Image (cartoon, coloured by chain):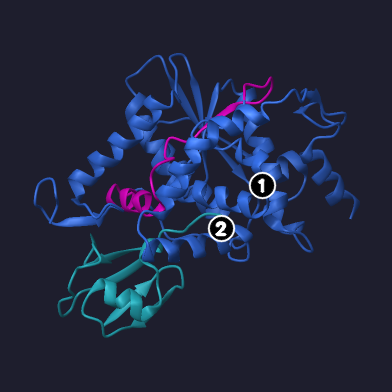
Chain colours: A cyan, B blue
């Protein structure tokens, strides 16, 4: 599956089945991002379904 | 599922409690109102200058304060934006903020480094630590402009993460006097010429603020100050976030334990340092020449 990450402005491939698995696979810290699936915020125990559109949004912004 | 109403959760708090969209927004709103109430951040008759940058924290703060006080004639507020002149970052933020304030009929005042000091930040940071220059100049402008516009308090969007980082940064640098000025109501005591700063988002984590901003459609495209990644604060932020992932509640503990010793720190450092007028610009300062003038002199002489 693919996830777009706004801070890096690129897409990442991942194989994990859950959000927490995906974040570990991509080396991202739970506290530093929110994950949006099909336009809705999900928690880290969410299990992906086929064709889910995944966005990772950084909570760190500004300066 | 949401621990309050069993609907689909959107966030897990540091306690492990999961909340749905509606319950989380209610929790967030309630917690910010409690912070304002318990720490006496806003009084009747206050005019609040809300420092905005166009980012999620300051616009969330503005949105909430506007909702809380829009029908309360005893408190008024306006938005105050400082444009440092960072190309590809601040200009987009300014446009987003203008639109945000216009939609809510909130007065917005914008001042720039270019206008006030004669240069954009981008043109003077070479060979310098950008945050050290920018921090001094922005704080000075926020204070003087808020004061000149009649504000009695200056509200900033600093959140729990910001505070935990500041506490640790000051510890690492053995800078407890600076820590004495932290807290939901900053400063050690009222000083002529200085507007007291309040932080209504003080107990909200950065992730909670981002989640709230996303759910309320306050966020815009991701923007990050290009000078942020190399900063000392960013190193501390990354370290703290990794630790929080391993040991949830760490950031809350850092801030809560600090709040226990803050009264003693404020007492210790309230001191008798007199406030004078800067010999160059006349602004209040504890030194002969204020920090802003020192920074400006360094920039202009190079």
Mark before the other along the chain sequence, 1 or 2: 2
Secondary structure under the numbered disc 1 in the rendered image = helix
Quarter-wise, where is residue B18 in the image? bottom left
Where does residue B32 sit, x and y in percent of width and height?
35, 35
Does residue B140 lie above or below B241 as drawn? above
Q: Chain of mark 2?
A: B
Where does residue B65 sit, x and y in percent of width and height?
39, 31
Name the residue at 64% across, 23% down. Answer: B148
Q: In the image, which disc is placed on residue B89?
A: 2
Quadrant location, the C terminus of chain B:
bottom right
Does residue B271 lie above or below B175 as drawn? above
Near mark 1 (Cα within 10 A), the count class, few <14, some 14-19 or many ≥20, is few
Does residue B3 lie above or below A36 as drawn? above
The answer, for residue B112, to whether it is visible in the render is no
Highlighted magenta segment, given as a residue range? B189-217
Q: CA distance from mark 1 to mark 2?
A: 16 Å
The answer, for residue A10, to whether it is visible in the render is yes
Name the residue at 35% across, 24% down. Answer: B70
Quarter-wise, where is residue B284 in the image? top right
Q: In the image, which disc is placed on residue B135?
A: 1
Examine the structure image and report whether residue B208 is included in the region drawn in magenta: yes
Q: Does residue A38 appear left or right of residue A3 in this picture? A: left
Quarter-wise, where is residue A18 in the image? bottom left
């Amino acid at each position: 599956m693919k996830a777009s990450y706004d801070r890096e402005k690129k897409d990442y491939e991942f194989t994990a089945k859950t959000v927490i698995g995906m974040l570990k696979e991509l080396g991202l810290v739970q506290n530093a991002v929110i994950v949006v699936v099909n336009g809705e915020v999900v928690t880290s125990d969410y299990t992906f379904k086929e064709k889910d559109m995944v966005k990772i949004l950084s909570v760190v912004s500004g300066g | 599922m949401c621990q309050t109403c069993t609907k689909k959760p959107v966030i897990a708090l540091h306690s492990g409690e999961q909340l749905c969209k509606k319950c989380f927004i209610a929790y967030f709103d309630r917690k910010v109102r409690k912070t304002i109430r318990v720490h006496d951040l806003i009084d009747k008759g206050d005019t609040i200058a809300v420092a905005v940058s166009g980012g999620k924290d300051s616009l969330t703060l503005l949105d909430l304060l506007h909702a809380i006080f829009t029908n309360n004639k005893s408190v008024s507020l306006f938005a105050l934006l400082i444009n440092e002149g960072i190309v590809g970052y601040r200009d987009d933020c300014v446009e987003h903020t203008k639109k945000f304030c216009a939609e809510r009929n909130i007065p917005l005042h914008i001042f720039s480094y270019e206008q006030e000091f004669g240069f954009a930040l981008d043109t003077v940071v070479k060979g310098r630590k950008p945050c050290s220059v920018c921090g001094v100049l922005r704080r000075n402008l926020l204070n003087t402009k808020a004061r000149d516009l009649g504000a009695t308090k200056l509200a900033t969007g600093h959140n729990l993460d910001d505070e935990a980082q500041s506490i640790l940064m000051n510890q690492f640098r053995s800078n407890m006097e600076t820590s004495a000025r932290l807290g939901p109501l900053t400063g050690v005591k009222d000083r002529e010429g200085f507007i007291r700063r309040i932080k209504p988002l003080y107990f909200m984590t950065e992730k909670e603020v981002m989640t709230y901003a996303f759910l309320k459609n306050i966020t815009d495209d991701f923007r990050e100050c290009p000078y942020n990644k190399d900063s000392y604060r960013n190193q501390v932020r990354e370290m703290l976030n990794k630790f929080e992932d391993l040991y949830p509640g760490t950031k809350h503990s850092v801030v809560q334990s600090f709040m226990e010793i803050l009264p003693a720190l404020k007492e210790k450092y309230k001191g008798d340092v007199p406030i004078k007028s800067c010999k160059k610009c006349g602004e209040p300062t504890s030194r002969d020449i204020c920090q802003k003038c020192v920074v400006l002199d360094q920039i202009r002489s190079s």
